[in-house]
Amino acid sequence: MRRPDAVVIPEVSLDEEGLAVDATQVLAVDEIVSPSSPENDYGDKFAEYPAMGIAHCLIVDPRTGHTEVHSTPCKDRYQQKEPHIFGDTVPFGPWTLETAGSHRYGRTRE
């Protein structure tokens, strides 16, 4: 399994060292879009999560100030997508995320 930026799993699913987990035990993943390689977060990695049966995927994009909640996996796609903006209260599976404190990436000076 690829390494998402954050993962939600039952604590009992961790291996003895607490470093590895069986992908079938993953409840949700979170990807924070990288400014240098956004295609990685919206592309290959994103298609692998529903294929593994991961029920919920959150994409946080600090470049744009948006989040996307994806659910209902079917093969290599999620059937449902709910867009939100930073500042929204975001329902994410059985959880609720407050994004009021989320920040966009700063602009670089030339």
Image (tube, helix red, strand yellow):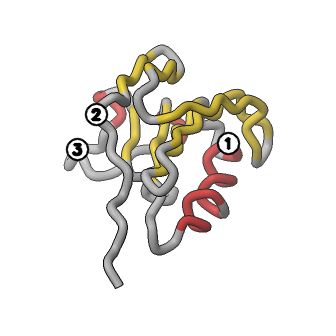
What is the number of the mark on residue 101?
A: 2
What is the secondary structure assignment of the residue under circle 2?
loop
Q: Position of residue 72 (x, y in %)?
A: 71, 28
Earlier in the chain: of badge 3 and badge 1, it is: 3
Q: Position of residue 16 (x, y in %)?
A: 23, 44
Q: What amino acid type should be assigned to the residue bearing mark 3?
A: Glu
Q: Circle 1 sits in a helix, a strand or a loop, which is it?
A: helix
Badges 3 and 2: C-beta atoms under 8 Å apart?
Answer: no
**Residue at (45, 67) in percent of width and height:** 35
Examine the rendered structure and indicate whether residue 54 appears above or below residue 88: below
Q: Look at label 1 and name its amino acid.
A: Pro
- The x, y position of residue 89, in whole percent, is 44, 19
6 horizontally vs 26: left or right? left
In the rendered structure, which amino acid carries the disc numbered 2? Gly
Give the mark nearest the N terminus, 2 or 1.
1
The label number, if any, that marks residue 50 in the structure image:
1
Closer mark to the observer between disc 3 and disc 2: 2
- Mark 1 nearby-residue class (10 Å; few <14, some 14–19, many ≥20): many
Give the side of residue 105 with respect to residue 69, left or right: left
Q: Which residue is label 3 attached to?
A: 16
Name the quarter where the C terminus is drawn: bottom left
